Image: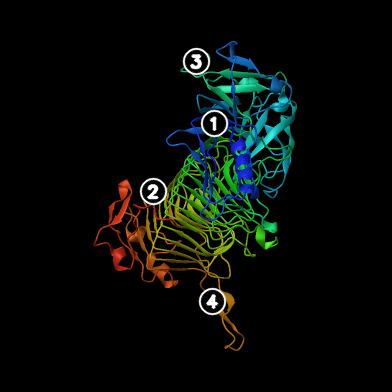
């Protein structure tokens, strides 16, 4: 039996468990209770094979009774003095000595923004000395032309000023190297991975400038002078700087579970419950402008490697500068349930393992992410994905509430095109994904898929209010090579672009979904390829504005190998997608006014599409208030549509998935 003892730190409790296990008396579960209060740390707690539990005898770190322990990677800053113009200052010796720097500051638990210009909106890139639309969009660029007056070569500590460019689906973070006032050319210390257009148009990208002392002109802004070590802050009207709690992050992470999967040395049966984690400190290393899709190069505050059968449950992760969780190579059967994750620099979860080229024991699979609330993600790196599944299979993402992020909610897959992918058999269901995108970046969706993914299922998700900058802002988005995916029983509405979008895909089944109120389009397909892209059946499409079928909804004949019985083994096929048994309706248009990809409905049917489909009011209970339940006399029911129950969507007390 484990002795009952009190320790001053979590690390000391961990070490005591290690010593106890060596006695050979580890015959029951062990629990570390944390009393209420703040547990400061400067580096994350490391758990290895030595710290594992065994089946039926886990090792648990949890709060004591109803107390509220907080594991903090932050340091409180005190000693502020009045400066001028409503600004307060404090000298921080560690910053002056070069031992500490930070890019987040929190006052009374709320994030404050670095001094920036412009205060609202964006500047626009004025010219492209390294090339714009005429070169490939992935061309590395290190400079651009700015409009006169937007940048100033005389700003304080110019080398510490950061330009953040929002273009395509990324946010590039670029420290300034020099400003040429004769040509109005700014050159950066390293390159961005894309041209400085807004997207594929010739429009200049939008950008802001942060950490500018001369931009410290709004309440709630701050500036850190790394040369002098002085922190400047202009308080909000309600803040008293003699009593305010000002915290800046110090620690890079909270916790690392580190096994060695190739050597089969796993961290197992560790439970973390009912704990709060706040404040982590991280910045992009030199040369990294954050150009990887989904902010995939940003680390996490809690990482698992070579971990099995571990759980994080009822934890709060808030005010951090990175991803919350990373589940990396060799992780299996871990669970993340009922956690509250908010105001985070990047995304909530990144799950990634070895690829088909790596040792099989590095593969990551069968993890569960369920019943979590994830909101206000991408606060530092807005291209971050809420839940990012990369090279991983068999995961279950269910009953999560994901909202107010700046980019995609859930992303599945990490291989572009039709080559082999280990991303398969992932189930994404009963999630509520809403109010994402918020008009900042392009090319995003509530649920995004990528590459060959047999066995992957997207079902019973409630998706709404998805808004992109220029193009994108889709509900469900099948990107490059998405294949063999089932999409069913989803309700999608209020998207800037299509509720359902295909870039290019293969043999995806889309059935029994509701797509409603797309603003600019309802269904979109970008590419015609020599195979079946989608089987679209038993869906309801309901709209009042925008195109019904946008982009390339036509066929091209191709030769296809069916069997070896025929003389040459091939047959010419004319269909690259199938659509039937659907209900379409726009209450503002008569059937004769509806455009089916430049055809009438009857002409469309003669091409072999929607032969049994209807243009008819589906008889929703109250579509204006987004109640998409069907009345009993709905014509959709007569075509075989099954009612979709959204009452179980989002977090709750559910049976283990």
The answer for how far apart the CA atoms under marks 1 and 3 are is 29 Å
Q: Which of the two labelled residues, at mark 1 and mark 4, occupies the earlier sequence position? A: 1
CA gap, disc 1 to disc 4? Answer: 51 Å
* Placement of 530 over or under 56, stated as above or below: below
Label 3 – label 4 distance at C-alpha: 73 Å
Residue 25 drawn above or below residue 552: above
Q: What residue is drawn where x is 40% and y is 55%?
A: 655
Residue 603 image offset from top left, x and y in percent: 41, 68
What whole-number distance in Å separates the C-alpha atoms at marks 1 and 2?
A: 38 Å
Numbered circle sitting on residue 652: 2
* Nearest to viewer (mark 4 / mark 2): 2
Q: Say whether residue 204 is visible.
A: no
Residues at circles 1 and 2 in contact by the CB criterion of under 8 Å? no
| Figure quadrant of residue 331 | bottom right
Q: Residues within 10 Å of mark 3 (few under 14, many from 20)?
A: few
Question: How many numbered discs?
Answer: 4
Residue 270 at x, y percent in the picture: 55, 48
Q: Pointer 4: residues within 10 angstroms few (<14), some, or many (20+)?
A: some
Q: CA distance from mark 4 to mark 2?
A: 48 Å
Residue at label 3? 240
Residues tagged 1 and 4 counted as in contact (Cβ below 8 A): no
Q: N-terminal of the two: label 1 or label 3? A: 1
Give the percent coordinates (x, y) of residue 232: 61, 18
Mark 4 or 2, nearer chain start: 4
**Residue of label 4:** 573
**In the structure shown, which secondary structural element does the residue marked by tag 1 occupy?**
loop
Q: Position of residue 198 (x, y in %)?
A: 60, 42
Residue to which mark 1 is pinned: 121
Mark 2 surroundings: few (<14), some (14-19) or many (≥20) residues within 10 A = few
Q: Earlier in the sequence, mark 1 or mark 2?
A: 1
Q: Residue furthest left?
A: 633
State which mark lies toward you, 1 or 2.
Answer: 2
């Amino acid at each position: 039996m484990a002795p009952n003892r009190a320790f001053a730190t979590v690390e000391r409790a961990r070490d005591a468990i290690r010593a106890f296990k060596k006695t050979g008396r580890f015959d029951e579960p062990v629990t570390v209770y944390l009393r209420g209060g703040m547990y400061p740390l400067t580096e994350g707690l490391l758990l290895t094979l030595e710290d594992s539990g065994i089946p039926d005898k886990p090792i648990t770190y949890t709060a004591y009774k109803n107390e509220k322990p907080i594991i903090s990677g932050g340091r409180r800053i005190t000693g502020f003095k009045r400066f001028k113009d409503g600004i307060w200052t404090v000298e921080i010796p560690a910053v002056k000595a070069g031992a500490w720097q930070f890019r987040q500051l929190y006052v009374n638990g709320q994030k404050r923004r670095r001094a920036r210009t412009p205060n609202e909106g964006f500047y626009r890139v004025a010219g492209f000395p390294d090339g714009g639309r005429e070169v490939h969009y992935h061309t590395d660029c290190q400079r651009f032309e700015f409009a006169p007056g937007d940048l100033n070569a005389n700003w304080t500590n110019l080398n510490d000023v950061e330009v953040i460019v929002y273009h395509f689906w990324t946010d590039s973070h670029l420290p300034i190297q020099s400003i040429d006032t004769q040509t109005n050319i700014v050159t950066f210390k390293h390159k961005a991975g894309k041209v400085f257009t807004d997207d594929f148009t010739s429009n200049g990208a939008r950008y802001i400038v942060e950490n500018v002392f001369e931009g410290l002109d709004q309440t709630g802004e701050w500036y850190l002078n790394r040369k002098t070590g002085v922190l400047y802050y202009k308080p909000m009207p309600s803040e008293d700087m003699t009593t305010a709690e000002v915290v800046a992050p110090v620690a890079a992470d909270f916790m690392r579970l580190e096994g060695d999967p190739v050597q089969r040395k796993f961290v197992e049966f560790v439970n973390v419950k009912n704990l709060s984690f706040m404040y982590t400190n991280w910045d992009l290393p030199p040369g990294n402008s954050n150009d990887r899709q989904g902010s995939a190069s940003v680390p996490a505050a809690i990482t698992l490697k070579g971990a099995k059968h571990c759980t994080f449950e009822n934890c709060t992760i808030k005010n951090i500068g990175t991803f919350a969780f990373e589940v990396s190579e060799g992780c299996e059967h871990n669970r993340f349930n009922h956690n509250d994750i908010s105001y985070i620099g990047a995304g909530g979860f990144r799950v990634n393992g070895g690829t088909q080229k790596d040792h099989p024991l590095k593969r990551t699979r069968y993890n569960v992410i369920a019943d979590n609330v994830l909101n206000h993600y991408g606060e530092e790196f807005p291209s971050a994905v809420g839940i990012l599944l990369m090279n991983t299979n068999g995961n279950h993402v269910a009953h999560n509430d994901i909202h107010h992020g700046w980019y995609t909610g859930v992303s599945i897959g990490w291989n572009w095109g039709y080559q082999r992918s280990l991303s398969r058999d992932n189930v994404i269901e009963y999630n509520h994904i809403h109010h994402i995108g918020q008009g900042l970046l392009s090319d995003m969706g509530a649920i995004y898929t990528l590459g060959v993914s047999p066995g992957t299922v997207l079902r019973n998700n409630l998706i709404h209010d998805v808004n992109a900058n220029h193009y994108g802002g889709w509900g469900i988005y099948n990107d490059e090579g998405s294949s063999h995916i089932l999409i069913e029983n989803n309700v999608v509405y209020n998207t800037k672009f299509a509720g359902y979008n295909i870039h290019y895909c293969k043999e995806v089944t889309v059935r029994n979904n509701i797509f409603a109120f797309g603003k600019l389009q309802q269904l979109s397909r970008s590419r015609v390829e020599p195979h079946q892209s989608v089987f679209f059946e038993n869906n309801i499409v309901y709209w009042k504005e925008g195109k019904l079928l946008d982009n390339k909804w036509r066929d091209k004949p191709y030769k296809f190998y069916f069997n070896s019985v025929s003389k040459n083994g091939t047959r010419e096929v004319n269909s690259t997608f199938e659509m039937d048994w659907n209900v379409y309706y726009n209450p503002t248009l008569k059937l004769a006014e509806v455009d089916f990809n430049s055809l009438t409905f009857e002409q469309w049917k003669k091409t072999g599409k929607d032969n049994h489909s209807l243009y008819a009011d589906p008889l929703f209970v109250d579509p204006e208030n987004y109640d998409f339940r069907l009345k009993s006399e709905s014509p959709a029911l007569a075509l075989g549509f099954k009612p979709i129950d959204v009452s179980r969507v989002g977090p709750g007390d559910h049976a283990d998935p």
